Image (spheres, rainbow, N blue to C red):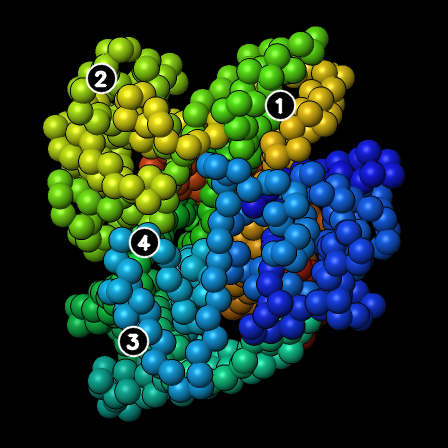
Amino acid sequence: MRTIVRATSSDARTLSELKAVDDLYPLYGQFRLEGGGDPAVALAPDGDRYGVVAAPELADRLDVRIGEVLRVGDAEVVLRGIIAEEPDRASSGAVLLGPRLMISVDALPATNLIQPGSMIFRHYRAKLPPGADLGGFVTTLQDRFPDEGWRVRDSRRGAPGVESFIERLRVFLILVGLTALLVGGVGVGNAVKAHLDTKRRSIAILKCLGATGADITRIFMIQILILGTAGIVAGLVVGGLVPFVVGGLMAQVLPVAPEANLFVLPLLLATLYGILITLTFALWPLGSARRTSAASLFRAMLGDGGERPPRSFIIGTVLSLAGLAGLTLLSSDQPIFALYFVLGAAGCFAVLWLAAQGVMRAAARVRGPRSSTIRMALANLHRPGAPTVSVMISLGLGVTLLAAVALIEGNVKGQVDRRVAEEAPAFFFIDIQPHQLEPFLATANGIDGVSNVQTVPTLRGRITRLNGAVPDESKVDPGEAWVLRGDRGLTYAANPPENSPIVEGKWWPADYQGEPLISFEKEAAVGLGVGIGDTITINVLGRDITARIASLRNIDWGTFAINYLFIFDPATLAGAPHTHLATAHAEGAAEQQLYRAVTDRFANVSAIRVKEAMTLFDRILGQVATAIRAASGVTLFAGMLVLAGAIAAGHRRRVRESVVLKVIGATRGQILRINAAEFAVLGCVTAIVAAVAGSAAGWGVITFVMQGEFTILPTRLAVVIIGAIILTTLLGLLGAWRALGRKPAAELRVE
């Protein structure tokens, strides 16, 4: 449960997550204290005071040391240790709004924190004999006690919240990996094209000697497959070794040391992805090179490789793409999410390719810039063999992903910050007993600067039946299945709430005394397949109450208002034991006065300071965003490698151009400026297109997934755009600098 803990020496206080354990704790893992010591001894009584142990953060907030006295509810306890390791923290099943304080279960009654209707979560652990049938035990328990409403978990799903987070993270990392793989595929295509361009003279000679197109295809396909296989094997070896290296490092951070192992299915999937990527991006340039004619050997210049490949190669490329998309869908546990990724990746590729074609055509049509540097830079964008397409696609995918992540993070944080400033109360007060309600209101309203104090009765209950039938979670909308898992907050009211308007049905009269009625949140009702006139049975404090749905309401869960899925008519729950929830706004010094006044007078009432909760949220959001940005950076890094490869593939051409320019009088500075202008234009167009695509992706996530309001954030987009321009320009200049290092005389002798 959550409660306020106070230091008797300084009267400092803070919200904490209180956990009471028995003598058998923990059944698994190690419960350790800083500096050693026996936790059981630390929690035992010494005279009339029990011992407690606390998280380091709690001791820091209260500025207390071991041996000092704390007050928990009505009881005084002694701090006897600082928690170094809490083995089952991940499976506690609740968001920790405060630091942990742990006491003996025998000390809990003296605190007087257990009141009728108090929000308490009880967890029972059972250690079964070795070899016991976990599934059978869980099934038997649920069969013998079908109406208890217990949530039973075994060691295979000990922390479903963490498991769900890790599963989503796994899916995200797979899709990020696929994005990086697609970017790498562009590099494969560039490398194959560059290699075949250097072999066009050889291909023409082979054709003069009688080689057929099929012979050319077999010769170079074998080369490509050998190189592709070598790359795939190297990737499998590195990917297989990484968990063993990272696992040892993460063992110091994670509560359970990871066990590194080799798994056949992921390695097989990676192999299939590698083969499909190789074929998808190699077939087109191979088919184009196959069309090299024998007569081209006698021309001054061989073709640039822009010939259209035969129909069979086009069909093969399309089939490889379809196989890649199909494998992505079949290997994902969330096929809808994977489908969105496939469609998004295809759309992003198409947009970037079309943008690249547009840049090339626009550069070809521009006439008469006075600056020779600009003229030559524009000519380089559309000349034969220009890296325009490969640069825009390879960098564009990574920049699109980073732009989307930056906008999503900024919108989420911005909306929360705005709503905290405009709507959020200073405090939420929980576990106010009915007899404490009037004194609480008098205390809060008696402080200058405190306003808008609102209270509602609150209970908890769980759905047991829908229209008389036990609900089947597999048959409801997955997005609303959470409503059936465990108990949910509920209340009663004579008048409809102002912040959740009725959209269907009607509210009951203020003096209603008929059959039980309930108002339900619309989206949840639609997801569960019920509506106006249907019945819903909710177990409240062990008693099943069947109520008819009288109205459906829309709830904006993004606000800081008090919202409930279920609202009963007052007569139905009038006699049920319950507590009250309150919110209050306070400004300046009144905030601290209210906090002290309430926690001094009502030891059992927990005060949740919204600012502290939002600080926790900001820290978690920042950590998640950093991890996502780091993962997205892999795609950008792959794009950088592909860009570097594209520049390296055109190195020979740039050397020739530099030599010619030097011979006709160009200086190193002029040549560098030409290359800088070329790649700056490429980077600028790529960044703008990627920023638009990333904004569209961010808008879709915020609007449809998070159901929020999307806002363009110019500063974040500007950082992404400027960064992409600088990165592209620097890599382009690096390639030009290498080309400038060649001596004209040596190159002219070769020619």
Mark nearer the N terminus (3 vs 4): 3
Mark nearer the viewer, 1 or 3? 3
Coordinates of residue 595 in the picture (x, y in percent): 69, 25
Q: Secondary structure at mark 4?
A: loop
What amino acid type is highlighted by mark number 2? Gln
Task: Name the amino acid, label 3.
Answer: Gly
Q: Disc 4 or 2, which lies upstream in sequence? A: 4
What residue is at 19 percent from the left and 53 percent from the top?
472
Q: CA distance from mark 1 to mark 3?
A: 48 Å
Residue on which disc 3 sits: 136
Q: Is residue 303 visible?
A: no
Tell me if residue 524 comes above or below residue 19 in the rendering: above
Q: Earlier in the sequence, mark 3 or mark 2?
A: 3
Residues 438 and 667: in front is 438
Three-letter amino acid code at the position of disc 4: Glu
Seen in the picture, residue 573 relative to 109 is either above or below; the reply is above
Q: Is residue 12 left or right of residue 568?
A: right
Whether residue 204 sits left or right of residue 364 in the image: it is: left
Residue at x-position 51% and y-position 78%: 239
Q: Residue under circle 2?
A: 513
Mark in the foreground, 3 or 2: 2
Q: Residue at x 75, y 58 (%)?
A: 45
Q: How far apart are the two marked residues, 4 and 2, measured between alpha carbons?
A: 29 Å
Which residue type does callout 1 highlight?
Ala
Residue 586 image position (x, y, % from top left): 65, 16
Q: CA distance from mark 3 to mark 2?
A: 46 Å
Q: Are marks 3 and 4 in contact (CB under 8 Å)?
A: no
**Label 1 to label 2: alpha-carbon separation:** 37 Å
- Which residue is denoted by mark 4 in the rendering? 148
